[in-house]
Image (cartoon, rainbow, N blue to C red):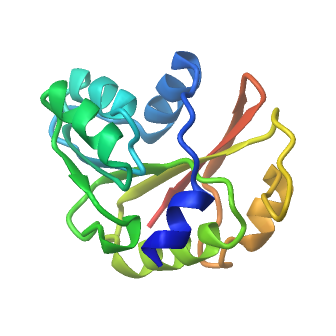
């Protein structure tokens, strides 16, 4: 699955306000075990670490992993489907493809501990093509066991909180 995943999740930088809103929604606090799936250059990890979380990330792109490591971040190069999420209290992701989202949500539901929080974003400002989802379509793809506890809109982005 690794070869196809990289093309389904292109690296893009989120506005700082949106990133902070995601971490606020999750209530990231000191001692939280936090992971960003597809962490890119580690911008979420830096912010979560400033909030006192114990951070880790997983990223496929070797260049972005190297950049994260220069920031002294705990980032592993690999496929998000290989991430061990069983002991985490907070997980974030921002992917855009309808093939990836339901598979990842199934994995997370099966493996995350009870009470853990998942925060994900569906970007609605950009026009996606070729099977990539808008927010309403993303929500329809999510397994029924994962219903958002809360959803907010920040700068045209729908952010959803799920609690296992």
Question: Where's residue 130, x and y in %?
Answer: 84, 61
- Residue 29 placement: quadrant: top left
Q: Residue shown at 85%/56% (left/top)?
A: 136
Up the image or down, 152 lies above or below 108; here it is: above
Q: Residue at x 37, y 56 (%)?
A: 60
Q: Quadrant of residue 142?
A: bottom right
Q: Nearer the viewer, residue 136 or 63?
A: 63
Q: Quadrant of the C terminus?
A: bottom left
Q: Quadrant of residue 50?
A: top left
- Residue nearer the viewer, 94 or 85: 94
Residue 18 spot, x, y in % from top left: 58, 25
Q: Is residue 160 left or right of residue 66?
A: right
Image coords of residue 54 (percent x, y): 16, 40
Where's residue 118, x and y in %? 46, 55
Asked whether 100 or 118 is in front, the reply is 100
Numbered marks: total: 0
Determine whether 38 is above or below 146 in the image.
Answer: above
For the point 33% across and 33% down, the residue is: 42
Residue at 30 percent of width and 30 percent of height: 48
From this view, report whether residue 160 is shown above or below residue 139. Answer: above
């Amino acid at each position: 699955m690794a070869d196809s995943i990289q093309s389904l999740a292109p690296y893009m930088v989120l506005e700082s306000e949106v990133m902070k809103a995601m971490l606020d929604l999750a209530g990231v606090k000191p001692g939280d075990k936090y992971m960003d799936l597809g962490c890119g250059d580690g911008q979420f990890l830096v912010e979560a670490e400033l909030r006192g979380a114990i951070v880790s990330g997983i990223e496929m792109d070797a260049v972005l992993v190297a950049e994260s490591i220069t920031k002294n971040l705990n980032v592993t190069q690999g496929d998000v489907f290989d991430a061990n999420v069983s002991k985490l209290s907070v997980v974030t992701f921002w992917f855009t493809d309808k093939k990836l989202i339901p598979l990842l949500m199934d994995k997370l539901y099966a493996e995350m501990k009870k009470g853990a929080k998942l925060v994900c974003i569906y970007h609605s400002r950009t026009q996606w093509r070729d099977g990539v989802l808008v927010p309403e379509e993303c929500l329809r793809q999510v397994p029924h066991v994962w219903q958002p506890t809360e959803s907010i809109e920040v700068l045209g982005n729908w952010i959803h909180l799920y609690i296992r």
